[in-house]
Amino acid sequence: MVDEFKSTFMITELKVTSRKGYEGVLDATLVPRFGGRGIDEVDGVAAGELDLELSKRELSQSTRNNTQIVLRSVLRFAKVRGYIPRVPEGLPRLKPIGQCILEIPTDEEVDRILAAASASQRLAFGLMAYAGLRPNEVRGLRRRDVRLRWEGEAVAGGFVSVREGRSFGETHTPKTGQREVPVTPELGRLLAPVEAGAREELVAVTARGRPWGQSGLVQAFERVRDRVGLEGWSVYCLRHYAITSWLRAGVPVHVVQRMAGHKNLATTQRYVHHLKEDLEEAGRRMAGRRSGSG
């Protein structure tokens, strides 16, 4: 039944990155654990015993949650296909996961990262830092998706159309569909040499002219990040920087949601909350300074 689940549900219902995650959980944990049992024997008790084992191995709550999420998907699939009459009761509850802290570098830190990057890296990083693209969207961006507006010999605006992403060698449509992102002056300078060329050519490629691999951008960013002394940042900090910059510039939240490709407004609101905390901290510092001077 797992093979049927992989060849139908996982292909039609999951994006490529989720599919790879599901495959990892199935192959590494669920099949070795339950492969010798019938699907009707995988009940709440069996799922609870698995969760206890993962806990004893000191795996993270997110890893345990992911395992249970995949197991529930398999059980729901089995019910729909008629292999079991109902989804078992008593499945372990998903563990509460604290909200991740947003990594948002300063203007100066982004400048340092871009200055230390090679030309090919700088273009890829700039698409994240100034257009808010995800790494898979950077890998999938083509020349036909870049429309620049020129004034004389300088780029004065334009748009980047985010139509698709590329993950594990497969092209897919972003879950929120196509979106448009304005080209800032900083990004315009990086994209200026890109407009000439075949429309279907990829915009961001390696120094050898090859497509970026699945982990290539992450590894390239980490090397540059460490070189400039910003250990600990993830490549997604560049996208966070872009989204925060739009909000700081006064772009309405619902417009930022569309530009960022957020499915839910609540995701965008996290950035608004972060900015409010910045303002509150600034207010406290100003009040403390005034009190001290008094």
Image: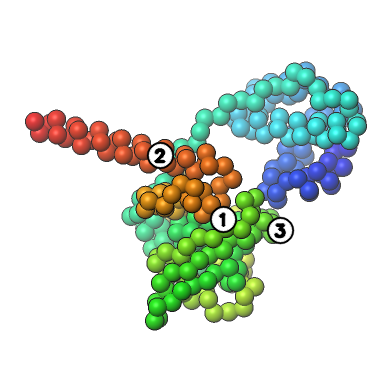
What residue is rendered at 75% in x and 43% in y? 23
SS type, badge 1 = helix
Label 3 sits on what residue type?
A: Glu
Task: Indicate the quadrant where residue 38 lies.
Answer: top right
- Colour scheme: rainbow
Label 2 sits on what residue type?
A: His
What residue is rendered at 84% in x and 25% in y? 86
Label 1 sits on what residue type?
A: Pro
Q: As rendered, which of 2 and 140 lies closer to the eye?
A: 140
Question: For the residues marked 1 and 2, what is the alpha-carbon distance in whole angstroms?
Answer: 23 Å
How far from the left and from the top, in percent, is residue 245?
40, 52
How far from the left and from the top, in percent, is residue 273?
42, 37
Question: For the residues marked 3 and 2, what is the alpha-carbon distance in whole angstroms?
Answer: 34 Å
Specify whether residue 96 is in view: yes
Compared to residue 252, the image places residue 182 above or below, namely below
What residue is rendered at 58% in x and 26% in y? 96
For the residue carrying disc 3, how many other residues have a C-alpha within 10 Å: few (<14), some (14-19), or many (20+)? Answer: few
Q: Which residue is label 3 attached to?
A: 170
Q: Are marks 3 and 2 in contact (CB under 8 Å)?
A: no
What residue is rendered at 53% in x and 76% in y? 195
SS type, badge 2 = helix
Q: Which residue is label 1 attached to?
A: 135
First reached walking from the N terminus: tag 3 or tag 1: 1
How far from the left and from the top, in percent, is residue 184?
42, 64
Q: Of the numbered discs in the image, which one, if any, rests on residue 254?
A: none
Q: Which residue is label 2 attached to?
A: 274
